[in-house]
Amino acid sequence: MLNILNISGSALLAQSCRINVSASNIANAESFDKNGIPYQAKQVIFKLDTSNCNNKIGGVKIKKIINDKKPWKLIYDPYNPNADEYGYIKTSNVNIIEEMVNTISASRSYQANIEVINTARTMILKTLNLGQ
C-alpha cells in the first residue's frame, strides 16, 4: 500500500517539473540571449522508475530536459538589426498553444495523483480502524 504513495509522489514531482518547464518556455518565448540567439524551447523526458519495485511497475523519473528540435520561426522584418540578408529574423520555437496544452495536461495529471494519494490514505486509515 505504501508503494502507491511512492509512485504517486514521483508523479507529482515529475508533473511539477513539467509545469515549471512549460512556464519557463512561455515566459521566454520572445527573449534572446546576449548574442542575439532566440530562446530555444525545452521539453521534459520521463522514464520508468522501478527502484522501489522489483517488477515493471513503478513511478516516474525525469530522465532529462532537452532542447526542442523544432525549427526557429522566421519573421520578415527587414528593418530589424538582427535581420539576415533576406530581411528575416529568427525567433523562438516556442508554440504558446502547445505549452498551454502541456500545462493543462500536467495540471490534470497532478490533480489525478493527488486523488490517488487521498484515496490510498483513506484506505490505509480504514484498514487501521478494522480492528477497533
Image (spheres, rainbow, N blue to C red):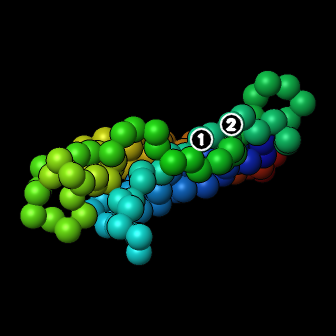
Q: Which amino acid, by three-letter code, is at mark 2?
A: Lys
For this view, does 114 lie left or right of residue 106? Answer: right
Residue most extreme to the front: 85
Query: Which numbered tag is attached to residue 92?
Result: none
108 vs 70, nearest the viewer? 70
Confirm or deny contact between disc 1 and disc 2 (CB under 8 A). yes
Q: Residue at x 72, y 34 (%)?
A: 48
Q: Residue at x 76, y 28 (%)?
A: 57
Q: Residue at x 61, y 55 (%)?
A: 13
Q: Secondary structure at mark 2?
A: strand
For this view, does 132 lie left or right of residue 117? Answer: right
Query: Which numbered tag is attached to residue 47?
Result: 2
Q: Which amino acid, by three-letter code, is at mark 1?
A: Ile
Task: Using the rendered image of the protein, determine whether residue 13 is visible from the camera's viewpoint.
Answer: yes
Query: Residue 68 placed where, x, y %?
Result: 46, 43
Query: Residue 36 placed where, x, y %?
Result: 35, 67
Residue most extreme to the top: 56
According to the picture, the residue beneath numbered tag 1 turns out to be 45
